[in-house]
Image (cartoon, helix red, strand yellow):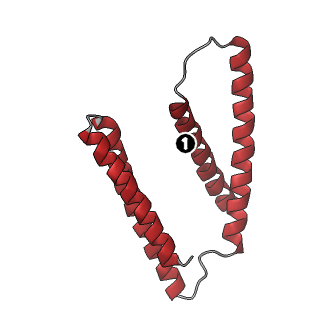
Amino acid sequence: MTTKQMLLLKYLILAFIGIIAIWQISSGNYAFGTGLLVGIIIAGITLSIKSRQINNLTEKGINPYDERVWTIAGKASYASIRVFAIISAIIVLTGSIWGPETMVNPYNLLGICLALLMLLYICFYYYYNWKM
């Protein structure tokens, strides 16, 4: 896929999420719909800023995706997956031994886990970027 096709695909995904947000607001779930709309606006702004930066770098003749970027991204993803797996295993082990039986909505739990994994990835990415 070309860069323009990837950018179009990202904007189509944001539009689809926007339709879901409008549907949630119209069905009475204002908090969730508003949260989705705010997230879409922030994601759209950061997406346009990033694409503008990449276009500026390519116009100057600089490859924005050089080997250093791929190395840092690989190290960050590997470290975040390892840390996340270890923390998840410790939480499951301690919860199964000492924790009470609680009802957890699996969709909320999955969202929290994905958010923590992405936060770990971002932290490790900036750490390795600073270190290298």
Left or right relative to 49: residue 98: right
Say whether residue 50 is visible. no
Identify the image quadrant of the N terminus.
bottom right
Q: Position of residue 61 (x, y in %)?
A: 57, 88
Q: Vertical placement of 59 versus 5: above or below?
A: below
Q: Which quadrant would residue 72 be assigned to in this image? A: bottom right
Q: Vertical placement of 73 versus 91: above or below?
A: below
Q: Residues within 10 Å of mark 1 (few under 14, many from 20)?
A: few
Q: Position of residue 53 (x, y in %)?
A: 47, 74
Q: Which quadrant would residue 99 be assigned to in this image? A: top right
Q: Nearer the viewer, residue 79 or 35?
A: 35
Q: Position of residue 20 (x, y in %)?
A: 35, 48
Q: Vertical placement of 96 versus 89: above or below?
A: above
Left or right relative to 40: residue 113: right
Identify the image quadrant of the C terminus.
bottom right
Q: Which residue is labeled 1 in the image?
A: 115
Q: Residue at x 61, y 49 (%)?
A: 123
Q: Residue at x 41, y 65 (%)?
A: 11
Q: Residue at x 75, y 44 (%)?
A: 82
Q: Residue at x 52, y 26 (%)?
A: 105
